[in-house]
Amino acid sequence: MAKTLSFSCSACGARHARWSGRCDACGEWNTITEDAPISSGPAGKSLGNKRGRAVALTDLSAEETPPPRATSGLAELDRVLGGGLVAASALLVGGDPGIGKSTLLLQAAAKFAQSGLKTIYVSGEEASAQVRMRARRLGLADAPVQLAAETNLRNILTTLESEKPGLAIIDSIQTMWLDTVDSAPGSVSQVRAAAHELTTFAKRHGISVVMVGHVTKEGQIAGPRVVEHMVDTVLYFEGERGHQFRILRAVKNRFGPADEIGVFEMTGSGLSEVVNPSALFLSERGTPSPGSVVFAGIEGTRPVLVEIQALVAPSPHSQPRRTVVGWDGGRLAMILAVLEARCGIPFAGLDVYLNVAGGLKISEPAADLAVAAALLSAREDAALPAETVLFGEISLSGGLRPAPQTENRLKEAQKLGFTAAIAPAGGKTGTVDGLTLSRPSDLVGFVGETFGAG
Ligand code: TYD
Ligand code: MG
């Protein structure tokens, strides 16, 4: 019988029937590798010879809900988790190499251990002595965390079975290997099998397992996306190199909201929590200048004010540049098209650069109005009135739509000393004392009001 081959993309985990240079699921090049064969069991036997146990939904005891949660005392982490770590859950913490995942998890391990949850930190990348050195640097040298330096997953599971911790941290999943899988550590098959073993083990033994996954571009090592669908919670740790801010973002959470962020600052002695992110993101803002506006955004349940900067300059190229950091390039093209078609403000022949200050990535449509204002302010070389925040969504017709949680955004602006806000009319809002609210109903009205004739 011909052997059937299967291939997977190491970046996104998509399966393919044949090899090709580029994965059509995620568009990455040179990431498709052959999977190790999976033994199919005795030929001709399609049913298992044991029964899977089924339980009536009504038979499950009611005390099991809501799930018990352990809190670390790191408020930024607990909130992203949805109020604490759920027992017997599997988590993935992904991020670029060097962003601070090991630091975050060692600090979290120490906190969980200090609050009474038995915690084991398994490092496949560093020797125990190195982890201990890091702990000393973080001021956690005498935290009651157990350390292990091991990459053989079978040995790790044996340890976990005998030690019975409440939490096990596996740093990183890409260094783990199973002797039953015939490929190198870090390959798609190994990562997938190791993550599967760990998740099943977590559920069966009531241990919470946190797996660290490096985001990779080279395709030699399977990225965390291979594991995402297996775990209960997926967190990404992001940040710009050269900035000290780090953002922990929930992208999937079976036990809590999936859009929450936690903000940290990388210091010489580890990560410290940022209680007031708006103040931090606005801290580098100078006097009001053309092209700079403040967007009142919402990240998860929390309002966050952030500066949006635009630069518009005559282009020496036949194809003008459109460069975006921290926002979506497609959305920028849309705003430029709406400004041109509905307000008659052309951007042809002009290079456009847009930057969200502080390294935050914004995905809210409510940022549209702030982006449009930054672009116009840069193009007209006219600064917006000082101490003004903006938010609102722009539609293709040039209309403005109110953003959710208007009142929360306004309150945060007021708290940080802003005196005016521009937000679309409609929707429900209680006005906030001390803020002058201007409420344009469409983009043309906004441009007229803010920039004169435009
Ligand atoms: P690390 O946690 O090792 O990253 P990852 O596990 O995601 O690969 O963090 C590495 C970076 O963090 C490294 O460049 C040094 C820096 N760092 C600090 O700035 N302060 C600290 O206290 C620690 C422990 C690391
Ligand atoms: Mg690390």
Image (cartoon, grey):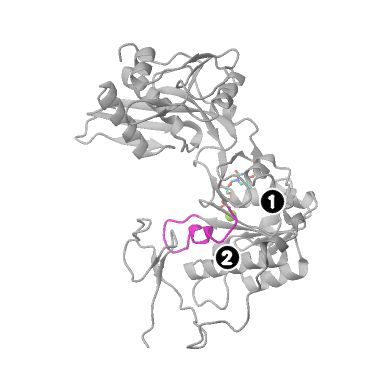
Q: Residue 195 carries which label?
A: 2
Question: Which image quadrant: the C terminus?
Answer: top left
**Vertical side of 38 occupied by 138: above or below:** above
Mark 1 closeness class: few <14, some 14–19, many ≥20 residues within 10 Å: many
Toward which corner of the image does residue 203 lie, by quadrant? Answer: bottom right
Task: Give percent across and percent down for residue 38.
Answer: 48, 78
Task: Give percent across and percent down for residue 71.
Answer: 73, 47
Chain-order first, disc 2 or disc 1: 1
**Residue sitting at 45 percent across and 62 percent down?**
13
Toward which corner of the image does residue 443 lie, by quadrant? Answer: top left
**Vertical side of 426 occupied by 31: above or below:** below
**Residue sitting at 46 percent across and 78 percent down?**
37
Q: What stretch is highlighted in magenta?
A: 215-233
Considering the numbered disc 1 on the image, is that residue within a helix, a strand or a loop? strand
Considering the numbered disc 2 on the image, is that residue within a helix, a strand or a loop? helix
Task: Give percent across and percent down for residue 393.
Answer: 42, 29
Question: Is residue 282 a member of the stretch shown in magenta?
Answer: no
Task: Identify the residue position indicated by label 1 in the image.
Answer: 85
Magenta stretch, main secondary structure class: loop
**Residue sitting at 28 percent across and 35 percent down?**
321
